[in-house]
Image: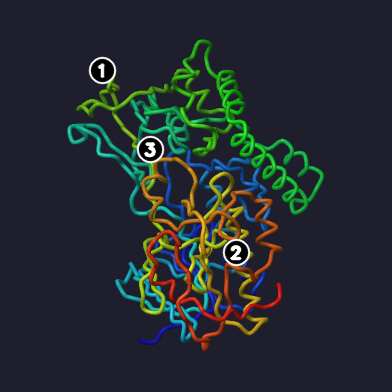
Amino acid sequence: MASEHVDVLIVGAGLSGIGAACHLRRNCPDKTYAVLEARDAIGGTWDLFRYPGIRSDSDMFTLGYSFKPWTDPKAIADGDAIRGYVRETAQEYGVEEHIRFRHRVARAEWDSGQARWTVHAHREDTAETVVLTCSFLFVCAGYYRYDEGYTPQFPGVDRYAGQLVHPQHWPDDLDHTGKRVVVIGSGATAVTLVPAMAERAAHVTMLQRSPTYVIALPSRDVIADALRRWLPAKAAYPVVRWKNVLLGTVNFQLSRRTPNVVKKLLRRAAKGRLPVGYDIDRHFSPRYNPWDQRLCVVPDGDLFTAVTDGRASVVTDQIDTFTERGVRLASGEELPADVVVTATGLNLLAFGGMELSVDGTAVDVAQTVAYKGMMLSGVPNLAMTIGYTNASWTLKADLVATYACRLLRHLDRTGQQIVTPLAPASGTLEPLIDLTSGYVLRSVDALPKQGARAPWRLYQNYARDVVLMRHGRLTDEGVRFSRATTPTAPTTASAPTAATTPAAASAPARAADSPVA
């Protein structure tokens, strides 16, 4: 079967994939590329999710691309604005003409003899199978399932006569005006939905099994507004970006080192926005430490305002069963509901569900070790984008794309064709994502592992990663460069504490290392 060849094949046309394509245009303009997108639109998460109030819980000065200033007045932006920003960026850099929509990648096969990937995609509009080859595969598909959100098995749910909705599949025709709504959950989606739906609903109840840390931040950045009055957007943007990066880093480090202090500060902030006598310890004081799970940001304190005004309420209890009219709790109380929203989380899915093989042997992603948080041990010429858990996703996505471009230029300059990460020879391995959120704990074992130190450790520290990814060495103990004709032999390219993954045997035995790029 004849196939088309490109230098770089990008999987996914969301925030990460469009950013990766733009970085290629900026830093490797000689490289040919294509973008395969399973859906029929640009935007990824920001096109898929359409529930009321959908917005980012990260500021847009850090969620925006490093090369394209965010100019909208709101620092915490809604989904429409973010989707428009991603599409505008794709248009500016001519990425749109390189996107193949409704191409769902099923599998990718690496051939060391030819130093190339063969990628099989299913066209969901024509039911055809499309085959492309590439020298470098760049997976920007996120890490959760787009076709299915997570919903627990609720007792009695079949008896419920009202409307049951998951935020990931929001009906276009759902009208909640004047209705009683129960939102099950306490994460970022729930705290977004509750104040948004409360604007038109008769009443909205956020039903949570346990509380989450919620912090109110201004929807506009006053420093950014001031700087933009005096400086061009391109000059003001990096200043505000670094200001927000540093504030976020300080917040995270304080939470890790002095969790009780941060707990008290968050509790005091919530108390100041809620009615006198409100039971903060029951409804807004989690059992875990700050940043064991992501903090939930509410712009301008909209959730607290809705609760204070009586348009919304928070109930902390267990579900006993659904009834015909709503939800009965373990305490015996029944919450009447015309609409129940199950904001109960996501299902993780590595690489968008695509299968990988190296020289005919399947890759078990869970048995690989992530190199610099972006490549897999024993898997040549592949990069993946996984953003920060304690900061904006795009901060890491930008660094990964920058590093991938450095690698591509290094291969050309040194006459090499293959870059293969190697796992550490020894040491303890840990999950790649270090949060205790339910959606992480349910599926984190299916993701790659990380090591105890660099370059196999993901430090969740942007400033440190800037040094490592933009200016650090490309040749180190964790990676080997070679050509297609170089003989290969087994290496320690899988997790040292688990059974050797078959793909590990593909790493080159001879290191054709080159000077620092």
The furthest residue to the right: 230
The image position of residue 430, as x and y in percent, is 48, 51
Give the CA distance from mark 3 to mark 2.
Answer: 32 Å
> Mark 2 = which residue?
401
Query: Could you tell me if the residues under marks 2 and 1 are in contact, i.e. CB atoms within 8 Å?
Result: no
Colour setting: rainbow
**Amino acid type shown at disc 2:** Ala
> Mark 3 = which residue?
343
**Which label belongs to residue 332?**
1
The mark closer to the camera, 3 or 2, is 2
Which numbered disc flags the more N-terminal residue, 1 or 3?
A: 1
* Above/below status of 265 relative to 234: above
| Residue drawn 34% across the image and 39% down it | 174
Which numbered disc flags the more N-terminal residue, 2 or 1?
A: 1
**Amino acid type shown at disc 1:** Gly
Image quadrant assignment for residue 189: top left
| Residue drawn 56% across the image and 50% down it | 388
Question: Which quarter shows the C terminus?
Answer: bottom right
Q: How many marks?
A: 3
